[in-house]
């Protein structure tokens, strides 16, 4: 069992290393945080960083913005405008690209189901899942990064 967990951790670490995230970035700062965090605090971090943004962003974008736009425009236009605003909130180019795809999906789910709660659950769980993967596999994740010279 332990060897299997180490194998999984090794594969996750290799995946993060392949992204070559420099320690000088915000993500690099988070990676250093993950390296030094205790297990109880890791769960607190996952809950706070995973659940709070998922709930608050969905309440605002799908619950407030998209709902009001749907009264005025077609679903495609309302979801499109909401997705653009949602994506721009995520600032970095890769964040904008990922948030665009996620925004379309969450917008369609909220519109088709008629409730934002499935979108809230999807958003919060995707962020929490990403945080969990990073916290499990990040120990020394930038050690082979040649781009920032931290190898």
Image (spheres, rainbow, N blue to C red):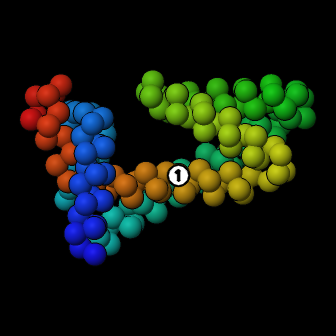
Q: What residue is shown at x 30% (from left), y 35% (from top)?
A: 19
Q: Residues within 10 Å of mark 1 (few under 14, many from 20)?
A: some
Q: Is residue 146 left or right of residue 72?
A: left
Q: Quadrant of the N terminus?
A: bottom left
Q: Is residue 21 left or right of residue 49?
A: left
Where residue 138 sits: x, y (%)? 25, 51
Q: Is residue 83 visible?
A: yes
Viewer-proximal residue among 91 and 150: 150
Q: What residue is shown at x 29% (from left), y 47% (from top)?
A: 30
Where residue 146 sits: x, y (%)? 14, 28
Q: Is residue 66 above or below residue 141?
A: above
Residue 22, image quadrant: top left
Q: Quadrant of the C terminus?
A: top left
Name the residue beneath numbered marker 1.
126
Q: What residue is shown at x 84% (from left), y 32% (from top)?
A: 75
Q: Is residue 24 above or below residue 51?
A: above
Viewer-proximal residue among 142 and 64: 142
């Amino acid at each position: 069992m332990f060897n299997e967990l180490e194998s999984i951790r090794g594969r996750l670490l290799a995946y993060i290393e392949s992204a070559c995230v420099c320690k000088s970035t915000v993500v690099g700062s988070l990676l250093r945080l993950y390296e030094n965090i205790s297990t109880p605090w890791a769960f607190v971090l996952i809950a706070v960083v995973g659940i709070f943004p998922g709930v608050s962003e969905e309440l605002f974008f799908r619950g407030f913005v998209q709902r009001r736009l749907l009264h005025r425009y077609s679903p495609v236009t309302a979801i499109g405008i909401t997705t653009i605003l949602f994506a721009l909130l995520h600032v970095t180019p890769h964040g904008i690209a990922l948030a665009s795809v996620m925004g379309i999906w969450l917008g369609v789910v909220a519109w088709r189901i008629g409730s934002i709660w499935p979108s809230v659950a999807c958003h919060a769980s995707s962020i929490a899942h990403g945080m969990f993967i990073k916290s499990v596999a990040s120990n020394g994740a930038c050690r082979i990064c040649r781009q920032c010279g931290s190898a």
